[in-house]
């Protein structure tokens, strides 16, 4: 197994941003970044190298976010593809940019 890279906080933050993470908030010297359901806390102490466990958590968070975004994209495509076939999901509408929303009408009983 290859050795993990030694990173400082700014390098870790750059990797997270390249992976699509957004800065959510900060508390003290810790910065919280997120992408979808994945959140990561990076201790931001200038000039200090991050501990190996923290670097591992950053790399795993990037991998989790990539897996989540690819599976989320496939799920959205399959739902929109199903609705485009004309079969539709009775009682649901696909709203662009939002996803599935229930219609005002209830589906018939037994469905």
Image: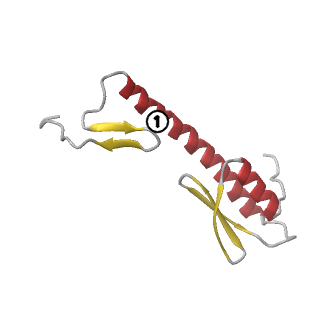
Q: What is the secondary structure assignment of the residue under circle 1?
A: helix
Q: How is the image coloured?
A: secondary structure
Q: Using the image, determine if residue 54 lies above or below residue 72.
A: below
Q: Is residue 2 left or right of residue 26?
A: right
As drawn, the residue found furthest toward the bottom would be: 28
As drawn, the residue found furthest toward the top would be: 85
Residue 91 place in picture, x, y as percent: 25, 38
Residue assigned mark 1: 75
Residue 25 place in picture, x, y as percent: 63, 68
As drawn, the residue found furthest toward the left would be: 109
Foreground of the two, 94 or 56: 94
As drawn, the residue found furthest toward the right would be: 47
Q: Is residue 55 left or right of residue 74?
A: right
| Residue at figure coordinates x 53%, y 54% from the top left | 37
Residue 92 place in picture, x, y as percent: 29, 38
Foreground of the two, 56 or 44: 44
Q: Is residue 45 left or right of residue 83?
A: right
| Residue at figure coordinates x 33%, y 37% from the top left | 93
Residue 111 place in picture, x, y as percent: 17, 34
| Residue at figure coordinates x 57%, y 42% from the top left | 69
Residue 8 placement: quadrant: bottom right
Q: Is residue 76 left or right of residue 110?
A: right
Query: Callout 1: 10 Å neighbours few (<14), some, many (20+)?
Result: few
């Amino acid at each position: 197994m290859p050795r993990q890279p030694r990173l400082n906080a700014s390098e870790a933050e750059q990797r997270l941003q390249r992976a699509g993470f957004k800065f959510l908030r900060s508390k003290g010297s810790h910065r919280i970044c997120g992408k979808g359901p994945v959140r990561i806390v990076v201790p931001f102490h200038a000039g200090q190298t991050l501990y190996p466990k923290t670097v591992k958590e950053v790399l795993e968070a990037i991998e989790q976010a990539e897996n989540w975004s690819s599976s989320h994209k496939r799920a959205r495509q399959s739902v929109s593809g199903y609705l485009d076939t004309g079969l539709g999901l009775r009682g649901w509408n696909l709203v662009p940019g939002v996803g599935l929303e229930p219609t005002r009408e209830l589906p018939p009983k037994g469905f």
